[in-house]
Image (cartoon, rainbow, N blue to C red):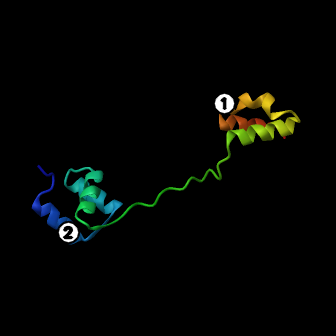
Amino acid sequence: MSNYTPTMIAEMQSTGSFTYDSALAFAEAHSLSVRSVISKVKHLGLDYTPKPKTVSSAGPRVAKSEIVNAIAKALDTDADMIAGLAKADARALSALLMAIR
């Protein structure tokens, strides 16, 4: 059994193309999930434009091992001696590095 009546399908086809927001509005109007509506839009071969992916504003990612290596260099010690620090939280390692410098 389908959650979509012929009237709903005709309404979708008359719309022609969907965005995430229009799929959400259609879903709310017909008590459906937005994922179901998007799936049906794609199944019907209608145009769908997904919402743009959010980009992290945190900046470039730095591996914790690189931070540990920088700490070792700042302390003028062997990185292997403090390798266990790589298990610490990245923010804590960054704060430690800034405190050393």
Residue 29 figure quarter:
bottom left
Location of residue 82 in the rendering, given as x and y in whole percent from the top left corner: 78, 29
What residue sits right under mark 1 in the picture? 87
Under mark 1, the amino acid is Lys
Residue appearing at x 10%, y 62% in the figure: 6
Task: Identify whether 65 is placed above or below 51.
Answer: above
In the drawing, does residue 24 fall left or right of residue 73?
left
In the drawing, does residue 87 fall left or right of residue 56?
right
Task: Identify whether 44 is placed above or below 83.
Answer: below
Dot placed on the residue nearer the N-terminal end, 2 or 1? 2
User: Can the viewer see residue 12 in this picture?
Assistant: yes
Q: Which mark is residue 57?
A: none
For this orientation, the residue located farthest to the front is 80
User: Can the viewer see residue 88 in this picture?
Assistant: no
Location of residue 80 in the rendering, given as x and y in whole percent from the top left corner: 79, 31
As helix, strand or loop, the secondary structure at mark 1 comes to: helix
Location of residue 30 in the rendering, given as x and y in whole percent from the top left corner: 19, 54
Residue appearing at x 68%, y 46% in the figure: 62
Q: Mark 1 and mark 2 in contact (Cβ < 8 Å)? A: no
Location of residue 11 in the rendering, given as x and y in whole percent from the top left corner: 17, 66
In the drawing, does residue 84 fall left or right of residue 57?
right
Residue appearing at x 89%, y 36% in the figure: 76
Q: Residues within 10 Å of mark 1 (few under 14, many from 20)?
A: few
As helix, strand or loop, the secondary structure at mark 2 comes to: helix
- C-alpha distance separating marks 2 and 1: 54 Å
Q: Residue 13 carries which label?
A: 2
Dot in front, 2 or 1 = 1
Q: How crowded is mark 2: few (under 14 residues within 10 Å), some or many (20 or more)?
A: some
Residue 74 figure quarter:
top right
Q: In which quarter of the image is the C terminus?
A: top right
For this orientation, the residue located farthest to the right is 76
